[in-house]
Amino acid sequence: MRPRGEVRLALGEAAWKVAREHTEGGTYRDIAPRACVGFAVAKRTLKDMVRAGELVITGTARVPGSARPANRYAPAPPQASVTPPELNTVMRSWAAVR
């Protein structure tokens, strides 16, 4: 797996900051200036981040100068690294050791 690029890192951090201020998330126009990234690049990269599971779309909002509403983005909730069946196996092995 390749490391995340500078633009993706900056947009991810900016999305977290916007999400702390606005509980419903922010549009690309809210996130891009904080990441020091152009609107077109931000729009494309945010869509890629949603597809990769890094961000989620929380709704839409009207953006000045645009006929269509823009998606609101927020960081995706963290995924558990251990599934319940795996956890069950670990718990049973600990009980057997005692």
Image (cartoon, helix red, strand yellow):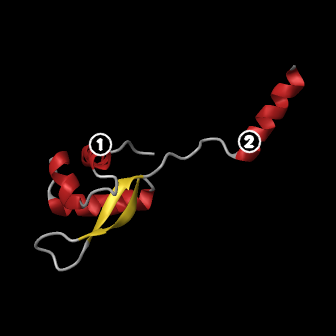
Inspect this view and state whether residue 41 appears. Answer: no
Q: Percent position (x, y) of residue 39? A: 16, 60
Q: Is residue 48 above or below residue 7?
A: below
Where on the picture, by quarter, is residue 6?
top left
**Number of numbered discs visible in the structure rendering:** 2
Residues at marks 1 and 2, CA–CA distance in whole angstroms = 32 Å
Q: Which residue: 23% across, 60% down?
A: 28
Residues at discs 1 and 2 in contact (Cβ within 8 Å): no
Tell me if 25 is positioned left or right of 34 in this view. Answer: right
Above or below, comparing residue 78 to residue 94 in the picture = below
Q: Which residue is mark 1?
A: 13
The C terminus sits in image quarter: top right
At horizontal 43% and vertical 57% (from top left) the residue drawn is: 52
Q: Amino acid at mark 2?
A: Glu
Q: Who comes first in sequence, dot 1 or dot 2?
A: 1
What element does badge 2 sit on? helix
Q: Which residue is mark 2?
A: 86
Is 96 above or below relative to 79?
above
Q: Give, as a three-letter code, the residue at label 1.
A: Glu
Q: Residue at x 74, y 42 (%)?
A: 86
The residue nearer to you, when weighing 97 against 69, is 69
What residue occupies the far top of the structure in this picture?
98
Q: Position of residue 83 (x, y in %)?
A: 68, 46
Q: Are there few (<14), some (14-19), or many (20+) residues within 10 Å of tag 1?
A: some
In front of the other: 45 or 16: 16
Question: For the point 10% across and 73% down, which residue is it?
Answer: 65
